């Protein structure tokens, strides 16, 4: 679904000096996978995300989306339709004054037959559980609801892959939960490939695999269990592990016999009961 080969990207400022925001990124994502990308501010996550639907083109290296080279201009529409993008601020993504018109905007731009647009909009709103709000004004909805409308707008274009750049960063805990549940559902039930960029460790636990970025490079990768069991390494690059994982490691240090790769409260409960 996604393949990047040695992607390098530089921003040039007015004085003519260059800043390399990506320094040789190699990533491969299979259709139907759920990938999380972690890294603190400025590590290059958004710059990388923008390469996945050709908003930015590599300075060196290549990005292939479903085999299509993003540098080839004739692929642009096909790439944008295959790989949809959801951003951090839901308010910047809403374009219409009625929810269903907002969701219809994407497929209208793609030139979808009006009869099919109705069907796509209804299906997308049902999927994100916002169908009953279809006649509402998006501006009066909660942050989580707005973000689900933004996701519905992407879904109505029938993408095979969705890239979400910190989609929960501006939401309260209940909004975050709604959006994460929606993302999991799209992956499990619709087999949509997910690239979730986040700085919340507990959101990354849901992924099949995690890439950790630091200063424009991938510095760690693996399953959530593999990545988060390296507590010291994660902390050395200024990130946290999920709270339950941290607690497990503190207990292990006290001599309690627990596995080092506990990621969820449920797993912790099972292990603690086993100790008894
Ligand atoms: P992240 O999303 O991980 O916070 P970004 O991809 O936004 O990281 O930024 C990576 C680096 O590139 C940062 O040092 C940032 O300051 C720089 N950068 C981002 N956008 C621009 C830009 N438009 N012009 C110059 N530098 C930029
Ligand atoms: Mg960013």
Image (cartoon, helix red, strand yellow):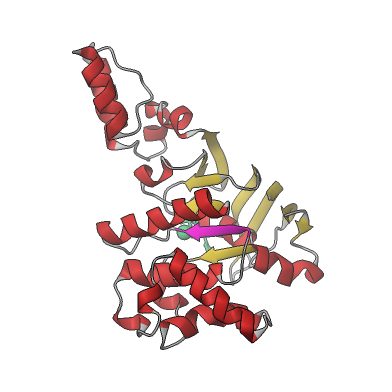
* Residue 44 appears anywhere in the view: no
- Does the magenta stretch mainly form a helix, a strand or a loop? strand
In depth, the one of 31 and 167 nearer the eye is 31
* Residue 204 appears anywhere in the view: yes
- The image quarter containing residue 253 is top left
Q: Residue at x 67, y 52 (%)?
A: 8
Q: Residue at x 50, y 65 (%)?
A: 86
Q: Position of residue 276 (x, y in %)?
A: 18, 13
**Does residue 185 appear left or right of residue 4 in this picture?**
left
Q: Indicate whether residue 161 is drawn in magenta.
A: yes
Q: Position of residue 118 (x, y in %)?
A: 55, 81
**Does residue 164 appear left or right of residue 21 in this picture?**
left
Q: Position of residue 103 (x, y in %)?
A: 50, 78
In depth, the one of 254 and 276 nearer the eye is 276
Q: Position of residue 29 (x, y in %)?
A: 64, 45
**Does residue 94 appear left or right of residue 243 in this picture?**
right
Q: Which residues are magenta?
A: 160-165
Q: Residue at x 38, y 71 (%)?
A: 130
């Amino acid at each position: 679904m996604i393949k990047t080969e040695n992607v390098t990207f530089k921003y040039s400022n007015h004085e003519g000096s260059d800043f390399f925001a990506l320094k040789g990124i190699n990533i491969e994502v299979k259709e139907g996978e759920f990938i999380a990308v972690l890294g603190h501010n400025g590590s290059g996550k958004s710059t990388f995300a923008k390469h996945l639907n050709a908003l930015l083109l590599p300075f060196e290296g290549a990005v292939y989306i479903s085999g299509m080279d993003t540098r080839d201009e004739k692929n642009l529409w096909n790439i944008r339709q295959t790989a949809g993008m959801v951003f951090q601020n839901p308010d910047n993504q809403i374009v219409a004054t009625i929810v269903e018109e907002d969701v219809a905007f994407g497929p209208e731009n793609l030139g979808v037959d009006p009869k099919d647009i109705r069907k796509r909009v209804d299906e997308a709103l049902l999927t994100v559980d916002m169908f009953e709000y279809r006649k509402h004004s998006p501006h009066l909805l909660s942050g989580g609801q707005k973000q689900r409308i933004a996701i519905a707008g992407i879904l109505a274009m029938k993408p095979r892959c969705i890239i979400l750049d910190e989609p929960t960063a501006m939401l309260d805990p209940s909004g975050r939960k709604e959006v994460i549940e929606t993302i999991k559902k799209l992956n499990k039930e619709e087999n949509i490939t997910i690239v979730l960029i986040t700085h919340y460790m507990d959101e990354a636990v849901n992924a099949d695999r995690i890439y950790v970025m630091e200063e424009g490079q991938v510095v760690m990768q693996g399953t959530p269990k593999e990545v988060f069991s390296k507590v010291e390494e994660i902390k050395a690059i200024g990130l946290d592990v999920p709270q339950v994982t941290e607690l497990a490691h503190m207990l292990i240090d006290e001599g309690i016999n627990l596995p080092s790769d506990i990621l969820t409260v449920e797993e912790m409960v099972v292990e603690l009961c086993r100790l008894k």
